[in-house]
Image: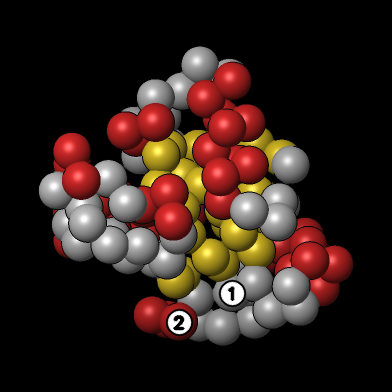
Amino acid sequence: MKIVKDKIEITELNEMSKKMFGNLVKAVVDIEKGIMAVDAELHVDLEQFLIEQGLEPKDLWGINIHPQKNGDEYIEFDSMINLKPALNNRTRGIESSEIRQKIIKIVNSLVKK
């Protein structure tokens, strides 16, 4: 597992995807701190890793990054950790367009293509 605070090369994400699932990298994004954790088999492992670093569960959202894709297919908003009824998110997706936009902005700022 790796915490990304500055930049990560798309080529590094591509290598991670080949080792794990072949076409995607699981990531958890902290929408308040503007960082993300990558490179684990489960989103919950990344979430726990960030919580152990002192981050708040309410700010953590799970995504899949598809390094070989572009546009809307590059980021997939699908994770069990996104089930947050207290925050009005009752699905594995991310229902709030505001949160989705924050995630897109953070990922685009951290991933060097």
Up-down relation of residue 76 to residue 33 (above or below): below
Q: Compute the Cα span from label 1 to label 2.
A: 7 Å
Q: Secondary structure at mark 1?
A: loop
Q: What's the amino acid at mark 1? A: His
Circle 1 crowding by C-alpha within 10 Å: few under 14, some 14–19, many from 20:
many
**Residue 96 location, quadrant:** bottom left
Residue placed under numbered mark 2 in the picture:
73
Residue 60 lies, in percent from the top left, at 41, 39
Quadrant where the image shows the C terminus: bottom right
Horizontal side, residue 113 vs residue 2: left or right = left
Q: Could you say which is closer to the camera, residue 20 or residue 67?
A: 20
Furthest toward the left, the residue is 88
Residue at left 71%, top 51%?
40
Q: What's the amino acid at mark 2? A: Glu
Q: Are marks 1 and 2 in contact (CB under 8 Å)?
A: yes
Q: Secondary structure at mark 2?
A: helix
